[in-house]
Amino acid sequence: MADRERRLRGADLAFLIGFGLYVLGGLFVLSEGLLAVAASSSDALHESLHVQGLGNGFFDRVALRAADASHSVPSAPQIVADYLFSAIHLVLAAVLLKLRPRDWTARLLATALVGAAGVFNLTSQGVLEQLPYTPPETLAQITAHVVAGLAYVYALLLFPDGRPVPRWRPTAIIPLYLTATAAAVFLSIRLEGPARPATLLLFFGLLVPAAGAAAQAYRIAHTADATGQAQARLLFWALLPSVGFGILFLVQHGLSPATNVLAGRNIPEPPVALYRTFQPAFALIPLALFTGILRYRLWDIERLLNRTTVYAIATGLLGGLYTAFIVLAQLLLGTVAASPLIDSKPAVAITTVVFLTAFRPVRDEVQKFIDRRFNRSRYDGQVTMERFAAELRHQVDLNDIVGRLDDVLTEVIQPRHVSVWLTEPRTPRVRGPRKSIQS
Amino acid sequence: MGRHFASIWRAVRVGGLVLVLLVGACASGSGDAITVRVDYDHDEFATQFIRYFPDNIQVHPGDTVIFRQDWTGEAHTVTFGTRVNEMLAITQPLLEEWRDVPEDHVPPEVLGAYYAAQCSQPVLYGCEEEPTDEEGATSEEAIEEPSGDIDQTIAQPCLIEQGSVPDDGMPCPTQELGPFDGTEAYYNSGFIGFAMDGENVFELKVSDSIEPGAYGFFCSVHGPFHSGTMQVVPSDQPIPSPSEVNQQTRQELNEVVEPFREVFESANEGQFVFGGEAFTGNFSGLTDDRVDGLLNEFIPETIEAEVGEPITWLMFGAHSISFDVPEYFPIYEKLEDGTVRANEEVYLPAGGAPEVEEADNVEAIVVDGGTWDGSGFWSSGVLYSDAYVKYTLRISTPGTYRYACLIHPPMVGTVTVTG
């Protein structure tokens, strides 16, 4: 058991390190795009990036790429669409990991979402294509695509119960998965030429939804549970547009570019049509996943949503009050020269401490409000418990107390059955199992 | 278990921060090395400059200078040595006086002195021997097809400690270049690598024992007008930092690019003035008297034509008009034994395009390229005239065709042919 514990911790650590690096890489790629966008609207930044780009270091290449790409950034709506897509993916990845930090399906999905956030962001990818890749950059680019693509495929194969499809024995399914993985990695590495990023995109753009749709179709056919079937059906339909667009694109353009004219010339010409086709199609997948998670209350999502809402409201409330207080005080006392209350750092510190101290009570109040307004069962449960505690002070009959306890527990936590053991007085009284309630 | 997970997560966050700081510390900046750009491809329009940026640098003994080449389609070298200093001592004063004067207005004795100095050592362009027939007379018929042979003393690294530089075109016996101490007779980088394979850098290690003073360098492909000076300053005296050198480089680049910007904008509006003459039409490369370089663009980028309608390009500089091109390959290739050969496929017509007879390269050349049926590799071959080349082609099949110049990688255009 201790060995298993250690193994788990080792695997957790390995995942967290790998995932952390992957997130850093993704954020780095996304920030390169933003740097190019900023340089496109600032001559001074553009010029200083060019000066920096004359050097020989890693960040000098970054600066040069951003400066060069600043002349060809997409239009403002396209940039917004790119970063909205990436932001949604990153937030969903964070939510998944928060919900199920130890669950490998959630981890795979989170990894896939982080990868998709970087890979499908045309603004950022356009920057990366500005300079010929160095060997380490080529390795990083292929690794990023392969990790994102395979994580996505595996996540969709395992979602939601973590059991791989088809439901074969491990001796059959492990070789199948290994062979498919090896083939995908081999093909990704073999892709060459200036169209490689686009072809990688197309390859995984087709593989991910095709494998996912097949897996969900299998689940629809082989799952008796109606909820499981509904989840699978939702995801299946969300995956179909990507499959359709991928096939359509493949029929029109093939796996290689129609003309070789750009090959070897280092002329960045991002496949805009490919990105703009796959981006909305791929946005459907995580949205369907989360609709499924919400709709069918998978993975304790209510808890997370509740916490997020409470903290957001509490922070917003106190932050707003804090800002309002400062602004108001400035308005009222601003005319008083060198007001020690406002201008002095201790005053600001004291105000901050006061508001920070107020955070917990405010959060509790907001929690109560949210529970009363949106989470009635929890609120009712709390009220019931409080009422029961008050009743106990006046209740003396043991049978009545046990009966009442049974009622309260049933109402508040809805257990499948309730048992009460009493050691005093001499003859223990046992009630239950009373009933079975499907939670 | 939850506590373990939290502590792991905390460790990862701390580790990540340390990693970011380490990467930042290791990867930022360019160290102490001064960088010199060899040639330059501008980011708004494709350019080529026969210059070093900056062309005057200061170093300390023991420093490293990085010569980084933008691959614009043109090969370059960085060549130092006492022989180079002797040559530049003659050519640079002449260049300063006569640089802006057209060559046919320069007195013959000046030209003679200049070329005598330039050709005292291997230079690829400008020192070719006049081809002669059997009777020793210059003859057009005696001109041979490109053989692919390149002077290996120029193309491969070469170190000659003392004495004269051989003119046999053979590879040097010593190709290992140690730190440069200023006493070498000839110290040549060879062709700096092709940018797309990431080998476009020549690192010059300045010896600790080098004497302070000025050391000239030049490109043995293009001759003394493509040259620079490295000032070695005693270690206790200050020199500009790499960052300051980069700022100087950028300033010089902005200055030389400005005339091209005017030319580019004017050509996009349909007009180009060169040698006092105004041209309109489709342009294949442009140039400007104020700049030692070329603007390597097809302007307009897209040409629209009817089936069979003559499409005419005015070519300034050496270019090709090539359709259905193979993957780009540079004008030279390095064989396994180190031999450097010209890629003849770049230069020769292909796909039925007519061969163009050699001309004196001074007057304009007018070429009718015939008709292309829209399929298969077709190339005009490389055409050049000091004036310009007027090249006409018809396309017999409707479609959208991408075309390119086989020399200059950024030169790509589109012809849309309607029925």
Image (cartoon, coloured by chain):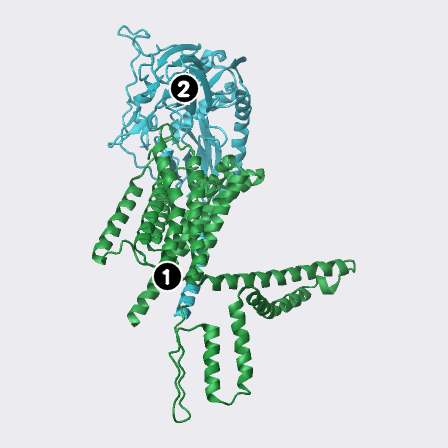
Residue type for callout 2: Ala
Is residue A354 something one can see in this rendering? yes
Q: Which chain is displayed in green in the rendered image?
A: A
Of residues A293 and A308, the one nearer the viewer is A293
Please state the horizontal and vertical placement of residue A133, each as a whole percent of the image. Answer: 38, 40
Q: Which chain is displayed in cyan in the rendered image?
A: B
Q: Is residue B58 left or right of residue A324?
A: left
Residue type for callout 1: Asp
Is residue A160 something one can see in this rendering? no
- Secondary element type, mark 2: loop
Q: Residue furthest left?
A: A171
Please state the horizontal and vertical placement of residue B226, each as a whole percent of the image. Answer: 44, 26
Q: Residue furthest bottom?
A: A426
- Secondary element type, mark 1: loop
Q: Which residue is mark 2?
A: B318
* Chain letter of disc 1 in the image: A
Q: Which residue is mark 1?
A: A103
Please state the horizontal and vertical placement of residue B327, each as a whole percent of the image. Answer: 33, 29
Q: Residue shown at 45%/75% (left/top)?
A: A410
Identify the image quadrant of the C terminus of chain B: top left
Identify the image quadrant of the N terminus of chain B: bottom left
